[in-house]
Amino acid sequence: MTASETLLKALKGFEGLSLTAYEDAAGILTIGYGHTGKDVRAGDRISEYWATELLRQDLRTAELAVNKLEVARTQGQFDALVSFVYNLGIGRLSSSTLLKVIRRGGSKKAIMREFKRWVYAGGRKLKGLERRRAWEARRYFEC
């Protein structure tokens, strides 16, 4: 599976666009629509076009990781998990109770509750993460 346009649009909204590198809430250098990595340095500047390209490249990594888990059966499930992985990384999803609940066929209520636990960055509860996890939880149960 691949990320939908619905996900791409949502991620742009969640991540926001910064054409100049900045430190995110966790102190990680970030640019574009949430791109991080060794290629991001303080003071870097990019275009909106390049920000979208970086987002698409980063999504490919998240898509591959989620596909390897073999748990997404619908586009909604896939998009929700890719969004989660794009934000937190495959390591966090792989070791999460969320994935355990999904694998054992947990209820809608249980899965939604697990998504909504992941709303902290740098030890602080963030409204933006609350909105994102709520979207992921809803998207997970859409077709």
Image (tube, helix red, strand yellow):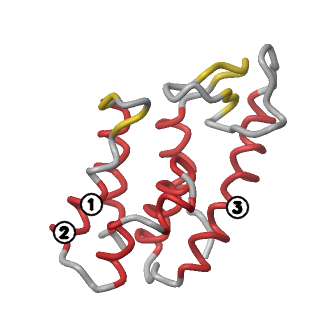
Where is residue 136 drawn, in percent x and y? 36, 55
Q: Is residue 38 left or right of residue 134?
A: right
Height in image: 120 above or below 16? Answer: below
Image quarter (top left, top right, bottom left or bottom right) of the C terminus: bottom left
Where is residue 80 drawn, in percent x and y? 43, 61
Mark 1 = which residue? 114
Q: Distance from label 3 to label 2 (Cα)?
A: 27 Å
Q: Quadrant of residue 102?
A: bottom left
Mark 3 = which residue? 61
Identity, as a three-letter code, of the amino acid under mark 3 = Thr
Q: Nearer the viewer, residue 114 or 96?
A: 96
Q: Quadrant of residue 31?
A: top right
Q: Secondary structure at mark 3?
A: helix
Identity, as a three-letter code, of the amino acid under mark 2 = Ala
Mark number, residue 110: 2
Q: Residues within 10 Å of mark 1 (few under 14, many from 20)?
A: some
Q: Residues within 10 Å of mark 2 (few under 14, many from 20)?
A: few
Q: Residue furthest top?
A: 43
